[in-house]
Amino acid sequence: MSSRFAWLFCCALATSGVASAQTPADLFECVSWGPEPTCTQIVGGVVIAPCGDLYFRFEGRYAWYPLRNLGSIAIEVKTLAFVNDLHPLYVEVVPYQQPPGFCNHDLGYVVFTTRGNSSECGGWETSRTVDITPFVPVGGLYGIRFYALMGRDDFSPGLDCVRVTGSSTTSAIRQGSWGFVKTLFR
């Protein structure tokens, strides 16, 4: 009976590892040709850059989720700023909760702010590498949420693409003491 229990336990562990491996740690989405964000509050319209590229103006919050935390992330956004873009575009990390309320009320942590790229076709901006483990444990789920402001004549920059690249911040070497090392070899 105990060997059957051990076999079931091993199968359960293997299955849970496969399920967690299916949640991506990286993201690359472009609103102009790909799926829209997982959730949005208000789409404020489409802006066509002088070179023909499409950028979307959002009002409020919009997010992509879920992503699996490996430890730290780098965020890249393709944005376009115009003269009237007086507000920044805020990029937040939001821990995943059930049911997700990413676009409404879940607490987010601002990790990157941009005022947009003002070149004719917009362009890419990159954050520094951000350790998100204070907000989301390693292996935990989170979302990337943007917060855009829109006034009567002033806006946050338009967005086309977002790329999130996760990387491990954990070491393969386990820290310990001599007492721990001695217990390994007894």
Image (spheres, grey):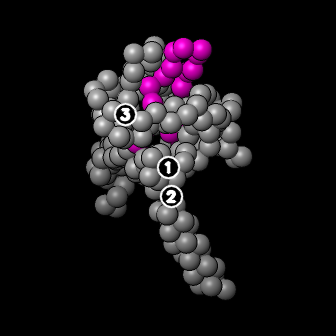
Report the residue at 59% width, 84% height from top: 3
| Res 67 label | 1
Picture quarter with the N terminus: bottom right
- Give the residue type at disc 1: Leu
Q: Residue at label 2?
A: 23
Which tag, 3 or 2, sits closer to the chain's start? Answer: 2
What span is colored magenta in the figure?
143-162
Q: Are marks 2 and 1 in contact (CB under 8 Å)?
A: yes
Looking at the picture, how far across and down is residue 138, in whole percent?
Answer: 46, 46
3 or 1: mark nearer the eye:
3
Q: Residue at label 3?
A: 49
| Whole-number angstrom distance, CA of label 2 to CA of label 1 | 6 Å
- Give the residue type at disc 2: Thr
Q: Is residue 134 visible?
A: no
| Whole-number angstrom distance, CA of label 3 to CA of label 2 | 34 Å
Looking at the picture, how far across and down is residue 85, in whole percent?
Answer: 44, 18
